[in-house]
Image (cartoon, grey):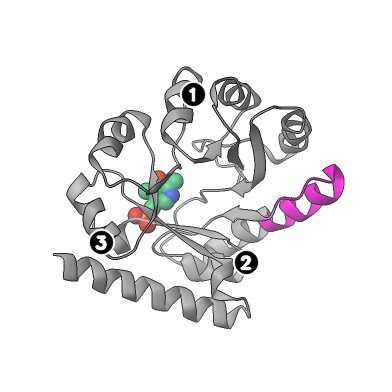
Amino acid sequence: MNETFLHRLETVERRIVAACKKAERPRDSVRLLAVSKTKPPEAIREAAACGVRLFGENRVQEAQSKIPMCPNGLEWHLIGHLQTNKAKIAARYFQMIHSVDSLKLLQALDGHAGTTLPVLLQVNVSGESAKFGMNPDEVAGVIDAANQMQKCEVHGLMTIPPFSPDPEKTRVHFSALRQLRDRLQDETGTPLPELSMGMSHDLEVAIREGSTWVRIGADLFGAR
Ligand SMILES: *Cc1c(COP(=O)(O)O)cnc(C)c1O
């Protein structure tokens, strides 16, 4: 089983290397977040034994019970919707939150974080009604508010595009997130280096469009 994970990791790594080359970007400009949601601590231990250090979880309660059973020295990122009343627990267990989708949530995280907490603002660039995420026109105000906060630091943007079996169809949403980031950097004067976008089936397109964090679950850990 360890060998299976290692094989999958090597395949994903080859895809990232190839996509970086095609985009004329250095390999170290993209980080691989191993999305371990629904997978048991043993699977995370195997991944850690293969050198993976960065893990993504989408539910606070699952992370809260799982993280203490995992090796020390791993970094945990929250990638799923967070309710304000769970901000305190999230701030304790996660080193970075990719899915901040309201000012209210950001304020709650800022109040509970013990040290500097890097966050990404999740934006609904496609306008799909079922998706979490801020409207693009809300984001500048949230960045301005974050600049007055003690603990939370906005490092960039995140999006989850509508699923399409053809990754090329997703490109427009990744491109929209990058353009929004460029515009917000100019408007607010805040550096926003990070773009969290791209999953198992569309990481190549995301890297071409400027992703700095690809969030990979199924292609590393197997189907859920
Ligand atoms: C599950 C999940 C992923 C990983 O998706 P895969 O298709 O399994 O690679 C990435 N991002 C978020 C927000 C997720 O919930």
- Camera sees residue 40: no
* Amino acid at dot 1: Ala
Magenta residues, as a range? 178-192
Q: Is mark 3 on a helix, strand or loop?
A: helix
Residue located beneath label 2 in the image: 209
Question: Magenta segment: does it hold 56?
Answer: no
The one nearer the camera, 121 or 44, is 44
Check the image and name the residue furthest to the top. Answer: 85
Work out whether 65 lies above or below 220: above
**Frontmost residue, 43 versus 140:** 43
Q: What residue type is labelled 3?
A: Ala
Three-letter amino acid code at the position of disc 2? Glu
Q: Position of residue 129 (x, y in %)?
A: 54, 36
Q: Name the residue under label 1.
A: 87
Dot 2: element = loop
The image quadrant of residue 108 is top right
